[in-house]
Image: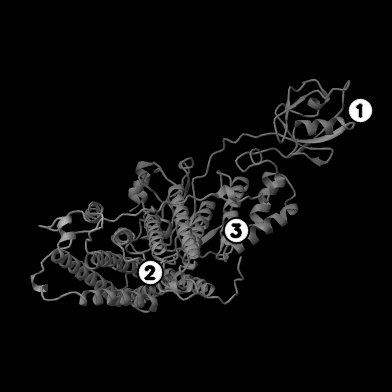
Amino acid sequence: GCNPLAETGRSKLQNQRAVLNQQILRAVRMRAGAENLLRATTNNKVREQVLLELSFVNSDLQILKEELEGLNISVEVYQNTTETFSIPLVPLGLKETKEVDFTLPLKDFILEHYSEDSFEYEDEIADLMDLRQACRTPSRDEAGIEMLTSYFLQLGYVENRFFPPTRHMGVLFTWYDSFTGVPVCQQNLLLEKASILFNIGALYTQIGTRCNRQTQAGLENAVDAFQRAAGVLSYLKETFTHTPSYDMSPAMLNVLVKMLLAQAQECVFEQLGLPGIRNEFFTLVKMTQEVAKVGEVYVLVNTAMNQEPVKENIPYSWSKLAQIKSDHYRALAHYFIATILCDHELQAGDDEDQQEKALCQLYDHMPEGLMALSILKDKVQRKQLGKAHLRQAVVCHEEALRLCGLCKKLRNIDVLQEVLTAAHKRSLLKYSQQETEDDFLSLIQVPDIIAKTEHKIEIIAPQFSKVKVKDFFHRLGPLAVFSAKQRWTAPRPIRIHREAGELGFSLKGGSPVQIYCLDPVCSAAAMGLKEGDYIVSVGGVDCKWLGVKEVLEKLKSVGEQPIEMEVISCQDTAASMHNKSATYSVGMQKTYSLICLAMEEDKIDQTKKTPLKLPFLSWGTKNRQKAASTLCLPSAVAGSSHLKKKLSPLTLLNSESSLY
């Protein structure tokens, strides 16, 4: 990873994000404590003091949230360093995390579960921790993506090796919400995997915003990066369910995917206009529909950002920027049509039918009383419709400038102001060049423009198979056999004496090999060898990765001399499964998947039924039978009892819609 102490613009922002996260954590804890005291006390004077403290803490939290929003809209740092005259693109900030020490839990598990000397695996554990630490500061390029992907794939091996379904390993993962700064702590490795996936998508967005948008190659790379970012976040939304933080909730991820695809569509338009837009009829028709498409997708993004439950947590400036872009690009579409109508008269050598068809395809309906062919032939009608489009363009530009002026964060982005002002002045200049004597007689209402693109933007699914990763704990043996889900006896020595050149058993399987067709009266059976045992070493040499042929050669290589081998036997794996996934949500009782439902003791005693529980995070659909609970700092709940209510396991309904 990058040097965490490097004083780059991006590292400064990430350091500020980490500091804000800690401040938000302290403020949330203070609020939780004040709410607990408010619920517990009956003294009016104490209650007044607590209410005053709560108002102070809540205002402090609001200020911290606004500061975090300021970091999320600090888009200039992530743009390309070359001089550009383009509206900035929005990147996602990386999720912050705390350090995790795998050493003791993994060493204990290796000794207990695999019956091996855990000190021999200290280097592998250190490599895993070093890789995780590097993932906190990935470089903003393909190497950073590859490193995060490597760690994500490595977590798959670690999960299968060390995280059994029957218990927790005691490793606590803490990740901070990218938008609210609220920490989520779980002993569930799936939180780690989901957060790494989010950071892969976020890093792709930072790569996309960094591309040089003054070159064709840079714009192509930007489009590709945003498509891949959308693919990773879409994969996260579909693969992990009941995610415990707002930034990874299905609703939020859906909005982020739409925003990233809209930015990719914006880059496609810039790519088409980079060589320059020729003032030619059919070229302008094509550019009109392309830019109208950009405006249309940003309208959808703005609508999605203003829906519950996303509206409360999406940065306000992001929503306003999407609205500004929708107005700006719709204004450009009207400007291009006005240019077609005002600058291009139907000449004798022009293809009349093609121009009529192209003009009809621009509108969902023609203006009242007008026909496409008559507009092309009649200079007065063409001028009137062109001026109507110019008026609409000016109105949209003015609305974009007004919205930009209302948002303090966007008002400080100089290049945004420059682009909007220049486009507005251009439309005003074009309008002033037209004849004005008939303005009061022109009542034409411009119709809606049909958006169309020849360059459809689609999600690019993540291709994890392209990153080759070697299991750090390869020496433990083949993962299909030596996993946390299967329990084994400790290796036991078997001393073999060849009888008439025969071993008394056969071997089968791949790696490791199994005992097959064991003669019950042979010396090996007398020593305790069983049918189905796995051979893990022969003559002190590890053979967990050897096949039948290699193991037979080792057994026969000693001739008539006795040889010692070690074998293991499979134990019953039908043990009862624990149903808890501890989550520490620091009193944020309104977080949609961290809601702590209180259950009265007398109701529990009467029903004697345990409600169905689901995990916060489910990897695919196979693990949905696992259960989860959450431990939350108690907080004030309106109408709650002072004495009878206590914290209880989180109960979630089966339908995802119930999360809201």
Q: How is the image coloured?
A: one colour
Instruction: Work out whether residue 616 can be spotted.
Output: no
Q: Amino acid at mark 3?
A: Met
In the rendered image of this protein, does residue 558 appear above or below residue 499? below
Give the mark toward the camera: 3 or 1.
3
Q: Amino acid at mark 2?
A: Leu
- Identified at 17% across, 56% down, the residue is 372
Instruction: Residue 551: give x, y in percent of width and height.
Output: 79, 33
Secondary element at image label 1: loop
Q: Residues within 10 Å of mark 1 (few under 14, many from 20)?
A: some
Which callout, 2 or 3, points at the residue further toward the start of the chain?
2
In the rendered image of this protein, does residue 357 appear above or below residue 590? above
Question: How far is mark 2 from mark 1, CA to CA?
Answer: 80 Å
Question: How far is mark 3 from mark 1, CA to CA?
Answer: 52 Å
- Identified at 28% across, 72% down, the residue is 400
Any mark on residue 37, and which?
2
Q: Amino acid at mark 1?
A: Glu
Which residue is situated farthest in the right direction here? 560
Which callout, 3 or 1, points at the residue further toward the start of the chain?
3
- Identified at 53% across, 41% down, the residue is 577
Q: Is residue 181 left or right of residue 38?
A: right
Secondary element at image label 3: helix
Q: Quick one: 385 or 236, which is closer to the camera?
A: 385
Would you name the residue on which mark 3 appears? 147
Q: Residues within 10 Å of mark 3 (few under 14, many from 20)?
A: many
Would you name the residue on which mark 1 appears? 560
Q: Are marks 2 and 3 in contact (CB under 8 Å)?
A: no
Instruction: Residue 165: give x, y in percent of width and height.
Output: 55, 44
Instruction: Residue 82: give x, y in percent of width and height.
Output: 49, 74
